Image (tube, rainbow, N blue to C red):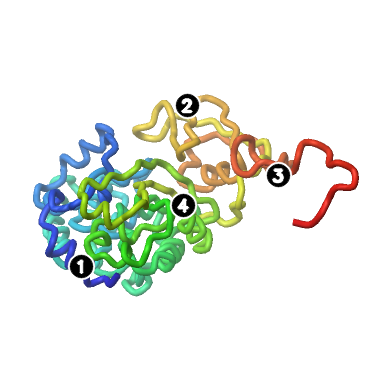
């Protein structure tokens, strides 16, 4: 599916979020009050041209340098700008002239509203991020809100993301995934593609792709099944099922392919803004304040070697290995019973 179709769909065909035919491009989870406060400070013009909902905003962003991939009208950029504050920076990249025009036109209004100016916008495609003048290793966090599925070369995007992140930085993004590889008819349907379904990756292909790009341990944060209320589009999709999901990928060398147990643990200090009682790393790491929390080696590094380090106490090292971390990853594959004498054979 070519980029010109996507440009036309989001620059000319769509005029408001109501024009979307499915909820695939929209994260509908209840957003917290502080998200709503951020969005209330954004101009009506920018909000009107934003084709989605929800807010892709990880915590602990004060002073961070952030890149928003597929920034559209700039809604998320202006929300994140408030989170990073005057000492941070947020850059948006989009390939649609109409969307960029709205984002650029809002810069003065938002600078006056916030009391500081810390945003900029670049035109470019995500497959060619290396060609728009962004320095490697520049960003603490890269975000994207349901855009990667629209890209023609997703592996190239992930590789560019890895090169643009600082060591310990993270790619925090939502997208659409399918339970199977999609047929050519679905992938080449212009409406299904524009609605974020035709370009959806089979989830297991995404995991393999992320690892190939250098993100050894993709972490799922949230997910929800998608509904397609349009009967005509549902018929075209057949039996394929879709989910909207948010992942975080850390740019850390040395992460292992499985969750290995070294007897390590952390204690959360409760100091991350908006998370005084519990810090949520992903869908199976809810770390309560003040409580010793055993972690695998990868999780330990994700916390100790990232911007989250100042918010935790760390215990243990990697001197002793205890196997796969309990209830996580692949268990010991061998039978618990002794093999019968004389049995055997190759696989």
> Is residue 112 in view from this perspective?
no
Q: Earlier in the sequence, mark 1 or mark 3?
A: 1
- In x, y percent, where is residue 204? 49, 54
**Mark 3 neighbour density, 10 Å: few (under 14) some (14–19) many (20 or more):** few
Q: Secondary structure at mark 3?
A: loop
Q: Which residue is mark 2?
A: 289
Q: Earlier in the sequence, mark 4 or mark 2?
A: 4
Q: Nearer the viewer, mark 4 or mark 2?
A: 4
Q: Secondary structure at mark 2?
A: loop
Q: Nearer the viewer, mark 2 or mark 3?
A: 3
Q: Which residue is mark 3?
A: 333
The one nearer the camera, 220 or 252, is 220
Q: Which residue is mark 1?
A: 7
- In x, y percent, where is residue 154? 40, 65
CB-based contact (under 8 Å), mark 4 and mark 1: no
Q: Which residue is mark 4?
A: 249
Distance between mark 1 and mark 3 Cα atoms:
49 Å
In the image: residue 255, left or right of residue 245: right
Q: Quadrant of the C terminus?
A: bottom right
- In x, y percent, where is residue 55? 27, 44
Q: Quadrant of residue 313?
A: top right
In the image: residue 173, left or right of residue 250: left
**Mark 4 neighbour density, 10 Å: few (under 14) some (14–19) many (20 or more):** many
Distance between mark 2 and mark 1 Cα atoms:
46 Å
**Mark 1 neighbour density, 10 Å: few (under 14) some (14–19) many (20 or more):** some
Distance between mark 2 and mark 3 Cα atoms:
35 Å
């Amino acid at each position: 599916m070519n980029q010109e179709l996507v440009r036309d769909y989001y620059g000319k065909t769509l005029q408001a979020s109501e024009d979307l035919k499915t909820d695939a491009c929209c994260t509908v989870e209840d957003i917290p009050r502080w998200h709503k406060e951020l969005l209330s400070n954004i101009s009506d013009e920018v909000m009107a041209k934003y084709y989605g909902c929800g807010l892709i905003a990880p915590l602990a962003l004060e002073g961070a340098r952030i890149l928003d991939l597929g920034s559209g009208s700039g809604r998320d950029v202006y929300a994140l700008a408030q989170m990073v504050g005057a000492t941070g920076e947020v850059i948006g990249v989009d390939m649609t002239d109409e969307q960029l025009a709205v984002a650029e036109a809002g810069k003065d209004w938002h600078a006056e509203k916030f009391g500081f100016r810390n945003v900029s916008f670049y035109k470019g495609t995500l497959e060619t991020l290396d060609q728009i003048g962004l320095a490697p290793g520049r960003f603490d966090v890269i975000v994207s809100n349901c855009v990667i599925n629209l890209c023609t070369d997703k592996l190239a995007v992930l590789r560019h993301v890895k090169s643009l992140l600082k060591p310990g930085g993270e790619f925090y993004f939502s997208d659409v995934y399918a339970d199977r590889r999609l047929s050519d008819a679905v992938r080449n349907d212009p409406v299904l593609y524009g609605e974020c379904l035709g370009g959806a990756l089979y989830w297991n292909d995404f995991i393999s792709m992320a690892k190939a790009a250098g993100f050894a341990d993709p972490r799922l944060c949230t997910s929800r099944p998608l509904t397609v209320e349009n009967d005509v589009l549902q018929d075209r999709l057949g039996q394929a099922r879709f989910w909207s999901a948010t992942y975080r990928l850390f740019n850390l060398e040395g992460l292992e392919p499985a969750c290995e147990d070294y007897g390590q643990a952390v204690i959360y200090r409760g100091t991350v803004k908006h998370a005084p009682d519990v810090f949520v790393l992903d869908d199976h790491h809810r770390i309560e304040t003040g409580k010793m929390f055993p972690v695998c080696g990868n999780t330990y590094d994700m916390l100790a070697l990232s911007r989250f380090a100042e918010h935790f106490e760390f215990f243990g090292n990697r001197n002793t290995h205890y196997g796969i971390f309990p209830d996580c990853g692949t268990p010991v594959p061998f039978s618990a019973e002794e093999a019968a004498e004389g049995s055997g054979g190759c696989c």
